[in-house]
Amino acid sequence: MAQDGETILLTVFLKHDQSKNLEQIQDHLAKTGWWERFPPAGAEIVGWNVVMGIGQIVTLRLPPKLLAVVNVEIERCAWGVFATEFYPTYDFVPVRERLKREWQAKRAGGKA
């Protein structure tokens, strides 16, 4: 993970090429080294889900400097069997908790 603790979340949609069957997809991934190359070192898998009829949704936590590395590995290994979409995000839970505390404090102050 990043030395300074700065990370982003990246959600990657891997949409199956439905003109290929599972064996063709797995063969392509094996030939390109997918299972060894993705995700690259320094990226942590937060979630990896199969969405029936669509493909897979992978969420990674990584330092921003690895964003280009993730992109290259997708291009190198996944293209040909997946159409891809990327959604960089951030963890909203700390922000939500702060906003909730502020709202509760404001509400409690108004009841005096």
Image: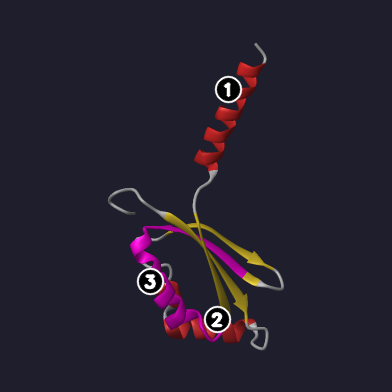
Element marked by disc 2: helix
Residue 23 lies, with reference to residue 105, above or below; the image says below
Determine the residue positioned at 42% across, 82% down: 76
Q: Choose the circle earlier in sequence order: 2 or 1.
A: 2
The total of numbered circles placed on residues is 3
Cα–Cα span, label 2 and label 1: 54 Å
Determine the residue positioned at 36% across, 65% down: 66
Which stretch appears magenta? 56-81
Query: Does the stretch in magenta take in 72?
Result: yes
Report the quarter where the N terminus lies.
Answer: bottom left
What amino acid type is highlighted by mark number 3?
Ala
Label 1: how many residues lie within 10 Å, few (<14), some (14-19) or many (20+)?
Answer: few
The mark found on residue 26 in the picture is: 2
| Residue corresponding to mark 1 | 105
What amino acid type is highlighted by mark number 2?
Gln
Label 2: how many residues lie within 10 Å, few (<14), some (14-19) or many (20+)?
Answer: few
Q: Which residue ends up furthest to the right in the rendered image?
A: 53
Element marked by disc 3: helix
Residue 102 lies, with reference to residue 59, above or below; the image says above
User: Can residue 41 be seen at all in this image of the molecule?
Assistant: no
Cα–Cα span, label 3 and label 2: 24 Å
Find out whether the residues at labels 3 and 1 contact each other: C-beta distance under 8 Å: no
Q: Choose the circle earlier in sequence order: 3 or 2.
A: 2
State the residue in front, 45 or 27.
45
What amino acid type is highlighted by mark number 1?
Ala
Find out whether the residues at labels 2 and 1 contact each other: C-beta distance under 8 Å: no
Cα–Cα span, label 3 and label 1: 42 Å
The mark found on residue 68 in the picture is: 3
Q: Which residue ends up furthest to the left in the rendered image?
A: 3
Q: Measuring from the top left, give residue 35's x and y in whole percent.
A: 45, 73
